């Protein structure tokens, strides 16, 4: 997963949010994509909740997306015998959701280095939060669990994307 590549979710959301959403029976327009996405995401509450959060961004949308991600985490916790307590499960769900929505470090905006005070140029000092990586730092203790949850979320997105392409073929 590279930093500058838009996430699948972002691509899906952009497809939904673009230009005029008018139905044209002759040509394929963004509304076709919306309809296809609606059909495809009916089978995955994670995708539709996540997409809703991405587009709406309300506290209610956050809670819905968070509980969808939590169901993924609970499933993994049981299948992989992680044996996490409630607090850790919540941390894994929250961090995975934040990371999935935006993987860049919020402190340096993904630049990896601190800005020289009073100038727009970057210093040689690595960002203390991401250590110059530019990506949102993962909780050290729960790194593996968060990474596993992220791959599950990626997989769900890619299945939805594939379903959208099949419908629009
Ligand atoms: Zn940083």
Image (cartoon, rainbow, N blue to C red):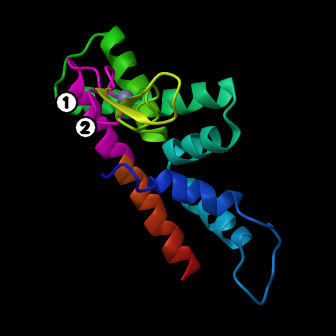
Q: Is residue 136 magenta?
A: yes
x, y percent for residue 56:
70, 39
Q: Indicate whether 102 appears above or below 127.
A: below
Find numbered disc 1 in the image and state the secondary structure of the residue it sits on: helix
Among the 4 quarters of the image, the one containing residue 15: bottom right
Q: Which residues are magenta?
A: 127-153
Instruction: Report the label total.
Output: 2
Give the quarter the ligand 1 occupies: top left
Instruction: Check if mark 2's residue and mark 1's residue have beta carbons within 8 Å.
Output: yes
Q: Is residue 140 magenta?
A: yes
Find numbered disc 2 in the image and state the secondary structure of the residue it sits on: helix
Per the rendering, the mark at residue 144 is: 1
Residue drawn at point x = 17 percent, y = 31 percent: 80
Q: Which residue is mark 2?
A: 148
x, y percent for residue 165:
50, 74
Residue drawn at point x = 47 percent, y = 63 percent: 161
Decide if residue 78 is in sight here.
no
Per the rendering, the mark at residue 76 is: none
x, y percent for residue 116:
43, 26
Residue found farthest to the left: 81
Q: Quadrant of the C terminus?
A: bottom right
């Amino acid at each position: 997963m590279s930093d500058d590549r838009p996430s699948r979710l972002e691509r899906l959301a952009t497809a939904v949010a673009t230009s005029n959403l008018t139905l044209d029976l002759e040509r394929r327009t963004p509304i076709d994509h919306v309809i296809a996405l609606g059909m495809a995401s009916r089978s995955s509450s994670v995708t539709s909740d996540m997409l809703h959060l991405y587009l709406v961004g309300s506290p209610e949308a956050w809670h819905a997306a968070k509980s969808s991600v939590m169901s993924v985490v609970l499933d993994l916790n049981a299948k992989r015998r992680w044996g996490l307590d409630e607090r850790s499960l919540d941390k894994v769900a929250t961090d995975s959701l934040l990371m999935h929505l935006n993987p860049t470090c919020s402190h340096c905006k993904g630049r990896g280095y601190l800005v020289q005070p009073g100038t727009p140029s970057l210093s040689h000092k690595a960002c203390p939060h991401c250590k110059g990586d530019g990506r949102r730092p993962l909780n050290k203790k729960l790194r593996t669990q968060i990474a596993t949850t992220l791959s599950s979320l990626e997989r769900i997105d890619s299945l939805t994307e594939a379903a959208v392409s099949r419908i629009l073929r």
